[in-house]
Amino acid sequence: MDKQLILLGLLLDEALYGQQINEIVELHADLFAESLRKPTIYYHLERLVADGLLTAETNFVEAPGPGLGHTLIIPRERKTYHITEKGRGQFITLLRGAFQQHTLPPAAFDAALFFFHRLPSREVVLLLEERLRRATDYRARIVFEWGEQNVQDQAAHALVHEHMLALIDADLAWLQQTVERFRKDSHSAHG
C-alpha cells in the first residue's frame, strides 16, 4: 500500500510521465527508495490505471533515440499519468490509514534473532557488532544526506528524517545493549 500512497501522492498536483516520477523518487531516495524501485514504478502505475485510480495518456515527443551518441532525435512514446477522483479518494484513505497504523513488519533479522541459538555465541556477537557498525554508518549517511539536501518542503522532509533518525537511534541503543549482553553471556560461558 505504501507504493500506492507514494505514486498517488506524487500525482495529486500535476500529471507526470514515468521518467519524471522516477527522477522524483531518485531525488528523494532517502524517503522513497526502499518502498519504490525504478523497475517496478511502471508496473505499479499500470496497476493503478487498471484499478481506475489513474488514467494514462499516450503522447509522442521528440527525444533522443537509442544508441551510443543519442544524436538522432526521433518521435518517442510517452505516457502521462493523471490521478482520477477515485484515485484522490484512495490516496486520502491510504494517508489516513498510514497515520493510524502502528505495526512494524517482521524482518529477516527478527527471524534470525529467534534462531540465534543455532550459531556459536561468539559468532552471534561478531554478527551483532557488524550490524551495529552498519547501522552507525547508515545513520551517519542519513545525517550527511539530509545536510546536503535542498528541498522545497523542508518541514515535511524534516519530519521524515527525524522519524528515521529516531528509529535508527532506538535500533542502535538496542544493538549496543544486546551486544553487551551477548559478550557478557559469552564470557561467563567460557569463564
Image (tube, rainbow, N blue to C red):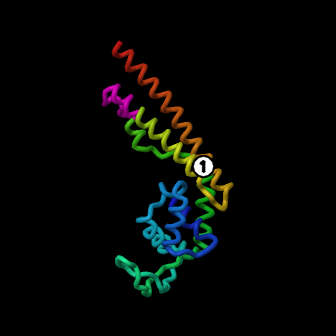
Farthest residue in the top direction?
Answer: 191
**Residue in view at x 37 percent, y 34 percent:** 127
Asked whether 62 falls inside the magenta stretch, the response is: no
Indicate whether 160 appears above or below 126: below
- Residue 137 horizontal/vertical position (percent): 48, 41
Q: Is residue 172 left or right of residue 93?
A: left
Determine whether, in the image, residue 75 is placed left or right of residue 143. left
Q: Quadrant of the C terminus?
A: top left
**Residue 68 at x, y = what percent?**
35, 76
Identity of the amino acid at label 1?
Answer: His
* Circle 1: element type: helix
> Residue drawn 56% across and 48% down?
144
- The magenta stretch spans which residues? 113-128
162 vs 79, left or right, is right
Q: Which residue is mark 1?
A: 161
Main secondary structure type of the part rendered in magenta: helix
Check the image and report above or below for 77 versus 184.
below
Give yes or no for residue 125 being in the magenta stretch. yes
Total of numbered circles in the picture? 1
Q: Residue at x 61, y 50 (%)?
A: 147
